[in-house]
Amino acid sequence: MTAFAALTSRSVVLRQSNIDTDQIIPARFLSTTERAGLGKHAFNDWRWQADGSPNPEFAFNQPQNSGRQILLAGANFGCGSSREHAPWALTDLGLRAIVSSQIADIFRNNSLKNGLLPIVLDEAVVQSLMQRPDDELTVDIEARELRTPAGDVHPFPLDAFARTCLMQGVDELGYLLLRDPQISKYEERFHAS
């Protein structure tokens, strides 16, 4: 995972509600345990036409959305079955943050463990942001805020542990491994007594 404390980017908009994990990464692509390369299959059935050519109507195929790192999505994003491949595919696609009024709990947890920031804001705020996808939004993980060029500040919930892991670029195991020297010292003291 790549550490990040803040990011500034324009947005890609997917207005649909109830985008489930099978739409994010269809089950036929789940046979790998490699993260790299899954981005080409993200939203596969929407991105590609039957003949394999790009669907020009799909947001991620539109040239103006290239390189954008924030997805503005309809309510109930990431619902459906639990699969870590979904955040893997989205991060491999280049996304770092998902903004929606509702993000499924399992997807949210899988995202946080894999370096993808799920941001939940009020529906009215999300709809307003969707009207201006070319605005450069700033996501500040340390402050737990999303800021607009107009000066609007939208706080979002993010627990302290997830915040620390994102800012250090580690998952739960990585967090523990970084503390191995302190853990070893504690164990030596514990076993010495």
Image (cartoon, helix red, strand yellow):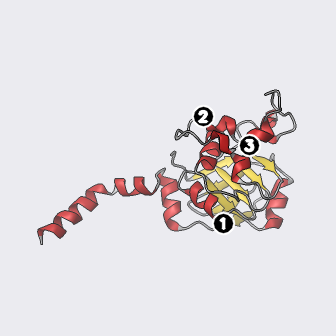
Which residue was labeled with disc 3? Answer: 43
Amino acid on which the number 1 mark rests in the picture? Phe
Which residue was labeled with disc 2? Answer: 37
Q: Quadrant of residue 26?
A: top right
Residue 141, compared with residue 7, is above or below; it is below
Q: Residue at x 68, y 34 (%)?
A: 40
User: Going by the picture, which residue comes out furthest to the bottom?
Assistant: 193
Q: Where does residue 76 sit, x and y in percent of width and height?
A: 75, 62
Amino acid on which the number 2 mark rests in the picture? Gly
Q: Nearer the viewer, residue 151 or 140?
A: 140
Amino acid on which the number 3 mark rests in the picture? Phe
Q: CA distance from mark 1 to mark 2?
A: 30 Å
Q: Nearer the viewer, residue 52 or 103?
A: 52
Does the CB distance between marks 1 and 2 fall below 8 Å?
no
Q: Quadrant of residue 52?
A: top right
Q: CA distance from mark 3 to mark 1?
A: 26 Å
Q: Secondary structure at mark 2?
A: loop
Which residue was labeled with disc 1? Answer: 156
On-image quarter of the C terminus: bottom left
Q: Nearer the viewer, residue 89 or 112?
A: 89
First in sequence: mark 3 vs mark 2: 2
Q: Where does residue 129 sit, x and y in percent of width and height?
A: 81, 56
Q: Is residue 115 left or right of residue 27?
A: left
Q: Is residue 74 left or right of residue 42?
A: right
Q: Nearer the viewer, residue 164 or 74?
A: 74
Q: Secondary structure at mark 1?
A: loop
